[in-house]
Amino acid sequence: MKRREFLKAGSIAAAGLALRGLSPLEGFGATPKNAKKTVATDKVRLACIGIGNRGWDLVREFGKTGLCDIVALCDVDLDADFCQNALAAHPNAKRFRDFRQMFDQTGGEFDAVTVAIPDHSHFPAVMLAMSQGKHVYVEKPMSRTFHEAALMMEMARRNPHLATQVGNQGHSEGNYFQFKAWQDAGIIKDVTAVTAHMNSARRWHVYEQNPHKFPDGQPIPPNMDWDTWLGTAMWHDFNKKYHPGDWRSWYDFGMGALGDWGAHLLDTVHEFLHLGLPYEVEPLRLVGHNDFFFPLSSTLRFRFAARGAMPPCDVTWYDGIDNIPSVPEGYGVSELDPNIPPSGNNTIQPAKLNPGKIIYSKDLIFKGGSHGSTLSIIPEEKAKEMAGRLPEVPTSPSTHYENFLLACRGEERTRSPFEIHGPLAQVFCLGVIAQRLGRKLTFDRHTGTISGDPIANALLAGAPPRLEWQEFYKL
């Protein structure tokens, strides 16, 4: 696509957002709405889009709840080994390779859908489902572009009777309830900085560095619907480096480590500190930067303005096995090499660090892991001193999967609906643009645009979808 055409397409998309009155802060701090009962029976009739790998996890977990009947299974690669568990577990479910055909042929036979397909295809599947009155559970990251997240939030706002849930399951586990309880009790307050890190060995980036083109085409697996797999993305010849697992590392299809793990590390910080959208995103380190796939390691700094009585806050993201952040003295030794002594500035450079976060407030420092792992106060001496002041933390009334199904029945509210998770998804989109372009972005939170950088601003919407997929952006 020529540069001029790309800029024009991005400008048109951005203008569309402005004309429709969408605000980047839509739903900021809002409370999720109750979903009215729209299911025909006591059990929610569920259709699953994407049934291999993480999709199989969803099929299994939803099946275990006893609250749903799985009536349809859809995957572009139904014959693949990774789909066979789901097919064997639900032999009576109708089978499809194209979710559009599933809606056309059996749309009246299910109430809700799960979407566990590559990031670039979340948007059309979600928008089609909601346009036909279906409740939606979609895996994180919610969308691949800032524009898509805005449209998904708007669709949810216009359909408050539909339950929406994003698959960051930590929102139904310990840290979600602990963070709110500690904040209400004044334990977590005046947070000025957060470090989030994912330094485990990566499951992508196993090919050459400094590429000058996309991989050459390979034979498409028998009976696989490659055209539907591509969805809204521009045409690429099939290659095993895209499917079945490495799609996440390519800008055209995924959101890298930030999109994969950010929702499991920053969800409670973002929601309960009311961070909204940053005014600046700066890449501080990019190793292996190129035009095609994500860097081998990245450090990104997101700057958030003051919110009411809450002070400004910087969130710094680290990924890559050679990009481990320093931690404060007294962090502990469970994830660290105890033989490494403290440095002179009261920080330690660990040899190994599991995915997690460090939260710095005016008076206290907290450390936590990923997903629903609860926070602890560091150092240990301070934790002991605070022990008698810590409030009781309520237990979760339901798993993340039960929560969604109960919301479909009007009995609970989803804990990670689009209006809550959408702005965080947009934060990730801004981070990916900074990674991709390798430069600092200045974001105008009032207009929802990137200032002084037309290429970056066009990437808020991204390249226009292929012709047969444009209809989903008009729903």
Image (spheres, grey):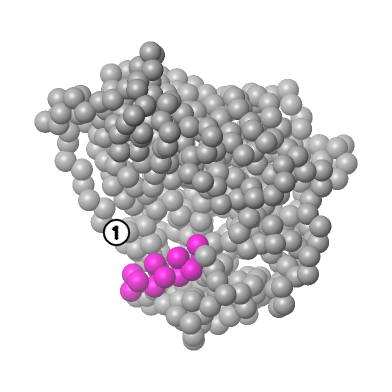
Residue 319 vs 408, above or below: the answer is above
Whether residue 87 appears in this view of the structure is yes
Element type where label 1 sits in the image = loop
Nearer to us in this view, 26 or 230: 230
Estimate the x, y position of residue 82 in percent, counting from the top left.
55, 71
Most frequent secondary structure within the magenta stretch = helix
Left or right of 293 on screen, residue 379: left
Looking at this view, is 148 or 380 the one in front?
380
Which of the 4 quarters of the picture holds residue 400?
bottom left
Quadrant in which the N terminus is drawn: top right
Relative side of 179 to 79, left or right: left
Verify whether residue 59 appears in magenta: yes
Q: Residue at x 39, y 67 (%)?
A: 61
Q: Position of residue 95 (x, y in %)?
A: 58, 80
Q: Position of residue 441 (x, y in %)?
A: 65, 26
Amino acid type at image mark 1 = Ser
362 drawn magenta: no
The reply, left or right, for residue 447 in relation to residue 114 is right
* Quadrant that contains the C terminus: bottom right
Q: Which residues are magenta?
A: 54-66
> Outermost residue, bottom direction?
92
The residue located at (11%, 31%) in the rendering is 388
Question: Image quadrant of residue 6?
Answer: top right
Callout 1: 10 Å neighbours few (<14), some, many (20+)? Answer: some
Q: Quadrant of residue 225?
A: bottom right
Could one spot residue 29 in this view of the protein?
A: no
Q: Which residue is mark 1?
A: 398
Relative to 153, residue 185 above or below: above
Q: Nearer the viewer, residue 78 or 177?
A: 78
Measuring from the top left, give residue 96's x and y in whole percent: 62, 77
